[in-house]
Amino acid sequence: MSIENDGDAGDVITPATPALLQSAGSRRAFLRSSAFTLVAAGVATACRDKDDVPASRTPSTVTQNPATTPASPKSQIPVEHGGTLPTPAAGPVSATAADAMDAMHEKGIKAFPAKTAGKGNQLLAPRVEKGVKIFEVTARKFQWETEPGKMVEAWGYNDQVPGPQIRVREGDRVRLILHNELPESTAVHFHGLEVPNDQDGVPFITQQPVKPGQSYTYEFTAPNPGSHMYHSHHNSAKQVGLGLLGAFIIEPKQKRAIEKVDVDYVLILNDGMHGYTFNGKGFPATEPIVARLGQKVRIRFMNEGMMIHPMHLHGMHMTVIDKDGWAQPAPWKCDTLNIAPGERWDVIVNCNNPGVWAFHCHILPHAESDHGMFGMVTALIVKKPGEA
């Protein structure tokens, strides 16, 4: 069936049967008739519904005492970290409950940055033999403090989470020696590096797994420059989640003007067995990024987790320059940047606004609850001249 337009640009064509169209005489008459029928039916239904409501339940007579009305089983909102919050209810809010919540929030803020044992992402200096830069990492189990008093089992490189930061220069000859002291086999994958196939570190595809007690040597010429990672690629949901990960940065032979900065900071995101962490720690034990007014900060985001984390900086925008180690066609600005699993994003922050600025994942259950801030929260501190 085809419906012809009668030339009125304001007409709306709706599906209809031929019989209805014929009885209406024209599409316009049919629409008028249908609209009248719908309105009449709606009025009749509304009147019937109103008449069916018992007098004791009409809006003018319904009353409810918040103090005596029992809470619905659904009146508790699950909170991912630290308990539950009641749904808003009519009546005065308990000042005692509000004060208790505020005290927990304040306690966390005042503790930041809290001291914990161990620090990850520490720069690993190589030894050099015949022009080859040699890095040695040992994978083993150890105890790791993610927040004050919270000890967890970690599997990491050189007793730190994230593992030691490796920095080389484009064209360098690199040798990485892995010693496996874990109860499982493992391997090292160089995420983002365009290495020869036999150096890619994926068991049963490019090599045999490195069994407990064994060592394995990787060697290649540092290829494409940029912000990259290294991590286990064997039982990886568990092994990377427990801490077998680290930053692998290849400096370019020639830096672009935009890459010349005062502070170069690596921020590794994870959401494995240790909870929501930045560089292996959860708030208030996360480390602030500190710069002076007028300085330029480069932040290298790396997501080693299994979830997306939109990173949001207060007070200043970020200028995005690189994605997965590759320069963007043109730098672009944002204040919230979505970091997906496996991604690396490089941004520049021009520190032109002094103060302590919150910096956090904007999936809010990853950062704050009724007990206060936790997990993926840190701060960018911009100090004025002469400020300690």
Image: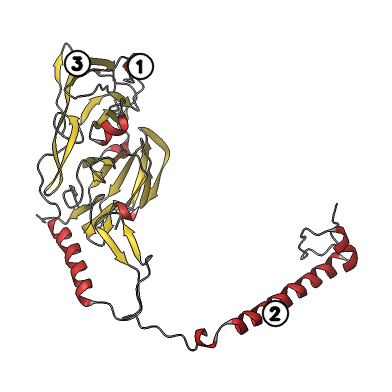
Q: Position of residue 205 (x, y in %)?
A: 37, 17
Image coordinates of residue 331 in percent, x first then y, are: 39, 43
Q: Which residue is mark 1?
A: 204
- Determine the image quadrant of residue 31: bottom right
Which residue is tagged 3? 215
Q: Residue at x 14, y 39 (%)?
A: 144
| Residue 111 sits in quarter | bottom left
Q: Residues within 10 Å of mark 3 (few under 14, many from 20)?
A: some
Q: Which mark is residue 20?
A: none
Kindly report the distance in space between the C-alpha atoms of the residues bearing marks 1 and 2: 72 Å
Residue 344 visible within the image: yes
Q: Which mark is residue 44?
A: 2
Of residue 78 and residue 6, the one placed in the foreground of this image is 78
Kind of residue at badge 2: Ala
Instruction: Kindly state the secondary structure of the residue where label 2 is placed.
Output: helix
Reply above or below: 83 against 278: below
Under mark 1, the amino acid is Phe
Distance between the alpha carbons at the discs numbered 3 and 1: 17 Å
**SS assignment at label 3:** strand
Residue 143 lies, with reference to residue 352, above or below; the image says: above
